[in-house]
Image (spheres, rainbow, N blue to C red):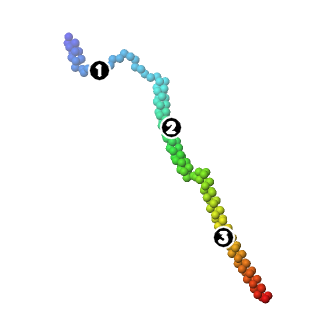
Amino acid sequence: MSASIIRRSIITRLPAATRPLSTSVIHQKTVTETVKDTIHTIDKKSGEVLAAGIQGAENATHTVKDKVSGVVGTARKNTPTAEEAKGMAKGKASEAKGKASEVAGEAKGKADEISGKAKGAFEEAKGKAQAKTN
């Protein structure tokens, strides 16, 4: 009896620890499964990185398109249309024609002036010649 009393007192004095009781075999991964899991993880990470890179490239493409369309729009605003260019050319041609007429008029006036001086000199010489003969 004394042995059973000692045993009971020891059991009652020890703290009750809960340990799950399991009769199944511990599942361990094979090398092939571990390699597959590692490759899957690497593939997932590289896919995320590539997706972020593609997203960045798309954003850059949109930014460039926006900038180019802005520059093209500005260029179109500053470039005259065919009708405007035609009108400007007609205006410049008319202006040049007017200046040419003005220069021609001035030249004709100078020619008339020189002609008048020549006629006057001729008449004067003719008058002197007649005065000497009389």
- Report the residue at 21% width, 17% height from top: 9
Q: CA distance from mark 2 to mark 3?
A: 74 Å
| Disc 3: CA contacts within 10 A as few (<14), some (14-19) or many (>=20) | few
State the SS at label 2: helix
Q: CA distance from mark 1 to mark 3?
A: 124 Å
- Amino acid at circle 1: Thr
Locate the C terminus by quadrant: bottom right
Query: Which mark identifies residue 18?
Result: 1
Query: Tag 1's secondary structure?
Result: loop
The residue tagged 3 is 106
Label 1 crowd (10 A; few <14 / some 14-19 / many >=20): few
> Disc 2 vs disc 1: Cβ atoms closer than 8 Å?
no
Residue type highlighted by circle 2? Ile
Amino acid beneath label 3: Glu
- Name the residue at 74% across, 81% down: 123
Disc 1 or 3, which lies upstream in sequence? 1
**First along the sequence among labels 2 and 1:** 1
Q: Is residue 100 visible?
A: yes
